[in-house]
Structures are given as structure tokens and as C-alpha cells.
């Protein structure tokens, strides 16, 4: 399922650590490992376009796994 979201990038201290997008709607998505590394900055506000991966699992289990296809940093 392809989606567009706005939110904040956060580093979660779970196990070895996980990157998440906390969307403006309150939902948390775990960022998939193949996503652009340039967006992995704690506190970065972004708009992302990506795909929820139903075929992937993680140890963090903080929310649906989101493979980001593109992103743009935004002001609040």
C-alpha cells in the first residue's frame, strides 16, 4: 500500500535501536532498512512517500514497517 505522510524522524532505543517516523496523525511507523539513509536524523521533520511492507518483520515491533521511496525535509 503506497502512502504519503508528514511527521518527525525519531531514533527509538529498543534493542539495538530502530528508526521511526512519528506521523502527524499520531501513528508510528518503523522505517525499513532500505529507506534513504539521508533522512535518518533524529528530530527531522519530513514528508515521505513510501510503501507499508506487509512482507517484513522486526524485533522492535513499534508499528507498521514503512519503506520510504522518497522524502523531503519540511519546516514544521
Image (cartoon, rainbow, N blue to C red):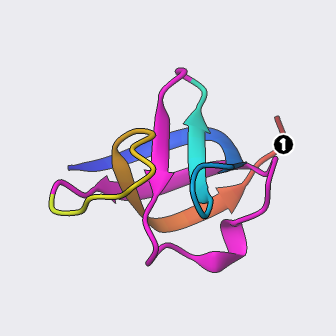
Residue at the spot 84% in from the left edge and 42% down from the top edge: 75
Indicate the quadrant where residue 73 lies. bottom right
* 16 shown above or below 59: below
* 26 shown above or below 32: above
Which secondary structure lies at badge 1? loop
Q: Which residue is mark 1?
A: 75
Residue at the spot 17% in from the left edge and 54% down from the top edge: 54
- Does the stretch in magenta take in 21? no
Q: State the image coordinates of residue 72 (x, y, percent, origin top left).
A: 66, 60
Residue stretch in magenta = 25-54
Asked whether, in this view, residue 56 is left or right of residue 37, the answer is: left
Asked whether, in this view, residue 50 is left or right of residue 53, the answer is: right
Q: State the image coordinates of residue 1 (x, y, percent, origin top left).
A: 20, 49
Q: State the image coordinates of residue 53 (x, y, percent, origin top left).
A: 24, 58
Can you name the residue that lies furthest to the front here?
Answer: 15
Residue at the spot 40% in from the left edge and 39% down from the top edge: 63
Can you name the residue that lies furthest to the top here?
Answer: 25
Indicate the quadrant where residue 40 lies. bottom right
Q: Residues within 10 Å of mark 1 (few under 14, many from 20)?
A: few
Amino acid at each position: 500500500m503506497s502512502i504519503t505522510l508528514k511527521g518527525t524522524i525519531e531514533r527509538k532505543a529498543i534493542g539495538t535501536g530502530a528508526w521511526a517516523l512519528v506521523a502527524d496523525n499520531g501513528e508510528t511507523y518503523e522505517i525499513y532498512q532500505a529507506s534513504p539513509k539521508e533522512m535518518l536524523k533524529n528530530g527531522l521533520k519530513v514528508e515521505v512517500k513510501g510503501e507499508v511492507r506487509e512482507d517484513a518483520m522486526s524485533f522492535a515491533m513499534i508499528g507498521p514497517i514503512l519503506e520510504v521511496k522518497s522524502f523531503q525535509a519540511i519546516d514544521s
